[in-house]
């Protein structure tokens, strides 16, 4: 009787606790700060879009979420504001707002409309 020392049956899939290490490595590779990423928010958007729209829409949507947050941060850094009345907004607030918008869109998505 052989025992598998790896509790993960598919070595190509990361267990949830490994996401922090992957995030740190991927962020470093791209020259980003891993502390700016909220794993739970990104995964929640991916889950809701995958279930409400289609599985392939999940990575596309999380990419768009990142672009939206990056553009808001760039606009804020350029002094263009990004919030009501031209006030600067922190990336966490922008992430939460944009994530909420995508989740709501996924919940009401009707491809026939």
Image: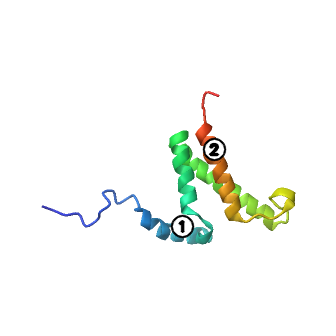
Which residue position is annotated with label 1? 26
Residue at horizontal 60 percent and vertical 32 percent from the top: 110
Single out the residue that lies furthest toward the left.
Answer: 1
What color scheme is it?
A: rainbow
Apparent side of residue 93 relative to residue 14 in the rendered image (left or right): right
Total number of numbered discs in the rendering: 2
Q: Position of residue 22 (x, y in %)?
A: 48, 67
Residue for point 80% across, 58% down: 83
Q: Residue furthest right?
A: 85
Q: Badge 2, how many Cα within 10 Å: few under 14, some, many 20+?
A: some
Mark 1 burial class by Cα count in 10 Å: few <14, some 14-19, many 20+: some
Residue 48: x and y in percent read 54, 46
Position of residue 43 measured from the top left corner of the image (x, y, whole percent): 53, 55
User: Which residue is nearer to you in this view: 10 or 112?
Assistant: 112
Dot 1 falls on a residue whose secondary structure is helix
Q: Which residue is mark 2?
A: 104
Q: Nearer the viewer, mark 1 or mark 2?
A: 2
Pick out the residue farthest to the top. 112
Residue at the image position 43 percent from the left and 62 percent from the top = 16
Per the rendering, the mark at residue 56 is none
Q: Is residue 67 visible?
A: no
Confirm whether residue 50 shows in the render.
yes
Identify which residue is drawn at 41% across, 61% down.
14
- Residue 67's image quarter? bottom right
Report the quarter where the C terminus lies: top right
Quarter that holds the N terminus: bottom left
Disc 1/disc 2 C-alpha distance (Å): 28 Å
Earlier residue among tags 1 and 2: 1
Q: Is residue 56 left or right of residue 84?
A: left
- Indicate the position of residue 93 as horizontal and vertical percent values: 70, 61
Residue 107's image quarter?
top right
Instruction: Say what secondary structure mark 2 lies in.
Output: helix
């Amino acid at each position: 009787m052989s025992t598998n020392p790896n509790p993960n049956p598919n070595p190509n899939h990361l267990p949830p606790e490994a996401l922090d290490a992957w995030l740190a490595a991927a962020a470093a590779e791209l020259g980003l700060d891993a502390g700016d990423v909220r794993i739970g928010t990104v995964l929640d958007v991916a889950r809701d879009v995958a279930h409400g729209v289609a599985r392939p829409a999940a990575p596309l949507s999380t990419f768009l979420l990142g672009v939206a947050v990056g553009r808001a941060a760039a606009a804020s850094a350029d002094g263009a504001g990004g919030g009501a009345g031209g006030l600067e907004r922190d990336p966490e607030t922008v992430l939460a707002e944009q994530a909420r918008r995508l989740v709501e869109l996924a919940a009401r998505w009707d491809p026939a409309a």
